[in-house]
C-alpha cells in the first residue's frame, strides 16, 4: 500500500447519478493499483474532477474549479490534476491549452486507463485517453461505494436517442447493456452485504436488452426484485416512448419495487417535442401517464423540463404550464436551455429565445411546480408513510432523513431508529420539498 500523500486521491463528482456511480468505478481502479482514497482534498496528491457536460452552467462550475486548482498547482508542483467524464469527451485535447492545471483527461469509456495515466504523468507530459469503446460496460468491477444502505447498479450505458438538445450521445457513446447474469450477481452480493436499497441506472434504462437472452428491462427489474425481496428497488432514467405496460405491471406486482417513476417530458408542446426529436407527442405522453396511474394509483411521478428551447413561442410555454398543472408531478428538475456543442440543435436550429425570456419562463415553471409540490405535500399531513432511513438529517443529529417509496424526502425524529431502518412515519408538517414527522406507533 502506497500511503504517502503522492499516492492518495480525491474525486469531485459533478452531474448525474451515473457519474456518481462512475466515481465508484474510478476509485476501484485506483485502489486496485495501490492508491488510497483521501478523506479530504487537502490531503490528496491526485485530484480528479468527474465532470458533467449536460448544461452550460455545469461546465462553467468546472472551469471555475480548474482555475482554482491552477493556483494550487503553482504552490504544490507535485499535485496531479485529472479531468474525467463527459466534458473531456467532447472538448478533447483543447482542454490542455484552455486549462493549464490539467495533467490528464479520461472519457467515460477509458476509466481503466486512469492509474496508468497517473504513472505516465509522473514521468512528464500531459495525456489524453478519450477513445470510445462501445463494448465497455465495466462488467464485474466492484465499485467503491459511498453508502452502506443505498447502492447504484448501472445496467446500461450510453444513449442512442439523439434528442436535439442533448450532448450525452456525444460524450457517452452508443448504448450497451450489462449481461443479465452479471446484474443479478451484483444484486445478490449487495443484498448479502446488507444494502437496503438499489437503484438500477442507465441514461435510458428502458432500452436495456440482454444480448444473450433478449430479456428487456421489465424482465430484469422483475428478476432483480425477486433476487433481493427485502431490498427496495428503484430505477432511473426512463424515456416516455419506451415505458411499456409490462414494466408498469411488473412494478405493481412486486412489492419491493418502489412506486416511483422519473419520466422526463421536457416540454408541454408537441411542436417543441418534434423539434427536440423526442419521438412522441404530448397526447402520447398523457396516455402513458394515464396508463401508469391506472395500474399504480399512488405512484410518485417526477419529470425534467427545459424552458426556452429553440423556436419556443409563448403558446408553447403556456402548454408546458398547462401540462404541469394537469399532471401534478410530485417534483421536477427544471432548466433553461443552453446550446451544447455538436448536438443536432446546435447544427440545425437557432437558439432564438432571448436569455431574459428563457429565465422568466423558467421562473414561471418553477413557481408553478413549487406550488403544486407544496399542495401535494400538504395533503400528506396526517398520513402514515413507510420510510427507509438513509442518514442523519442535515439540520439536527436528533433527526434522520429518509424517503418514501414514491421518493418523497422525509425528516423525522430519530428516537430509537438508525440509518437502514424501514419504519412508519406520521407526517406532521410539510414544505414543497420535504415532509416532516415522527415515528408512528402502529
Ligand atoms: N439545456 C438545458 N437542459 C438540458 N438537459 C439536457 N440537455 C440540456 C440542455 N442543452 C436537461 C434535460 C434532461 C436533463 C438531464 O437535463 O431536461 O432530461
Ligand atoms: Fe452530465 Fe449527461 Fe454526462 Fe450525466 S451523462 S454526467 S448528466 S452529461
Image (cartoon, rainbow, N blue to C red):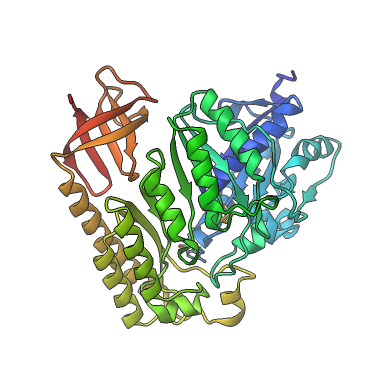
Q: What residue appears at the point 82 percent right and 34 percent down from the top-left corner?
A: 119
Instruction: Report the front residue among 337 and 22.
Output: 22
Residue 275's place in the image compared with 22, above or below, is: below
Q: Position of residue 382 (x, y in %)?
A: 13, 39
| Residue 15 appears in view | no
> What residue lies at 68% left-to-right and 54% top-to-bottom?
88
Quadrant holding the N terminus: top right
If the image is split into quadrants, where does the C terminus sit?
top left
Q: Is residue 278 visible?
A: yes
Residue 86 in the image, given as x and y percentages of width and height: 63, 54
Number of marks: 0
Most foreground residue, 145 or 395: 145
Q: Position of residue 105 (x, y in %)?
A: 73, 48
Asked whether, in this view, residue 368 is left or right of residue 40, the answer is: left
Seen in the picture, residue 93 relative to 221 is either above or below; the reply is below
Residue found at x 55% / y 29%: 190
Work out whether 357 lies above or below 431.
Answer: below
Measured as percent of width and height from the top left, residue 316 is found at 35, 79
Query: Left or right of 101: which side holds 407?
Result: left
Which residue is more in the foreground, 321 or 362? Answer: 321
The residue lying at 32 percent from left, 82 percent from top is 315
Residue 384 is drawn in which quadrant? top left
Looking at the image, which residue sits at the far right? 123
Position of residue 253 in the picture relative to residue 328 (left or right)? right
Q: Residue furthest left?
A: 382
- Say above or below: 299 vs 227: below
Amino acid at each position: 500500500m502506497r500511503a504517502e500523500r503522492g499516492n492518495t486521491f480525491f474525486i469531485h463528482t459533478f452531474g448525474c447519478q451515473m457519474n456518481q456511480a462512475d466515481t465508484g468505478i474510478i476509485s476501484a481502479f485506483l485502489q486496485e493499483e495501490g492508491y488510497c482514497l483521501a478523506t479530504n482534498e487537502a490531503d490528496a496528491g491526485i485530484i480528479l474532477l468527474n465532470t458533467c457536460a449536460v448544461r452550460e452552467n455545469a461546465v462553467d462550475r468546472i472551469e471555475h474549479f480548474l482555475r482554482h486548482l491552477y493556483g494550487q498547482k503553482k504552490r504544490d508542483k507535485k499535485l496531479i490534476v485529472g479531468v474525467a467524464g463527459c466534458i473531456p469527451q467532447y472538448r478533447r485535447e483543447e482542454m490542455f491549452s484552455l486549462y493549464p492545471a490539467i495533467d490528464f483527461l479520461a472519457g467515460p469509456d477509458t476509466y481503466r486507463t486512469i492509474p496508468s495515466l497517473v504513472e505516465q504523468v509522473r514521468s512528464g507530459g500531459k495525456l489524453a485517453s478519450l477513445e470510445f469503446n462501445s463494448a465497455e460496460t465495466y462488467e464485474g468491477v466492484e465499485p467503491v461505494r459511498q453508502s452502506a444502505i443505498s447502492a447504484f447498479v448501472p445496467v446500461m450505458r450510453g444513449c442512442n436517442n439523439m434528442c436535439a438538445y442533448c450532448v450525452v450521445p456525444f460524450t457517452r457513446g452508443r448504448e450497451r447493456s450489462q449481461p443479465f447474469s452479471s446484474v443479478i450477481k451484483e444484486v445478490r452480493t449487495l443484498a448479502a452485504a446488507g444494502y437496503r436499497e438499489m437503484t438500477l441506472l442507465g441514461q435510458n434504462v428502458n432500452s436495456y436488452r440482454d444480448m444473450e437472452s433478449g430479456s428487456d428491462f421489465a424482465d430484469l427489474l422483475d428478476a432483480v426484485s425477486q433476487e433481493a425481496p427485502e431490498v427496495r428497488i428503484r430505477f432511473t432514467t426512463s424515456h416516455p416512448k419506451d415505458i411499456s405496460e409490462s414494466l408498469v405491471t411488473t412494478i405493481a406486482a412486486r412489492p419491493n419495487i418502489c412506486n416511483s417513476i422519473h419520466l422526463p417530458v421536457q416540454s408541454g408542446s408537441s411542436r417543441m417535442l418534434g423539434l427536440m426529436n423526442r419521438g412522441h407527442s404530448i397526447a402520447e405522453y398523457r396516455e402513458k401517464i394515464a396508463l401508469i396511474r391506472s395500474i399504480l394509483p399512488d405512484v410518485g411521478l417526477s419529470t425534467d423540463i427545459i424552458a426556452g428551447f429553440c423556436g419556443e413561442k409563448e403558446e408553447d410555454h403556456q402548454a408546458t404550464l398547462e401540462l404541469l398543472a394537469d399532471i401534478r408531478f410530485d417534483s421536477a428538475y427544471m432548466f433553461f436551455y443552453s446550446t451544447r456543442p455538436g448536438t443536432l440543435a446546435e447544427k440545425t436550429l437557432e437558439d432564438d429565445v432571448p436569455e431574459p425570456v428563457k429565465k422568466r419562463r423558467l421562473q414561471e415553471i418553477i413557481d408553478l411546480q413549487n406550488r403544486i409540490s407544496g399542495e401535494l405535500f400538504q395533503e400528506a399531513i396526517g398520513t402514515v408513510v413507510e420510510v427507509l432511513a438513509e442518514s442523519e438529517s442535515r439540520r439536527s443529529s436528533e433527526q434522520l432523513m429518509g424517503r418514501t417509496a414514491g421518493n418523497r424526502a422525509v425528516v423525522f425524529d430519530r428516537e430509537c431508529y438508525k440509518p437502514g431502518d424501514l419504519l412508519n412515519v406520521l407526517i406532521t408538517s410539510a414544505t414543497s420539498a420535504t415532509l416532516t414527522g415522527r415515528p408512528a406507533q402502529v
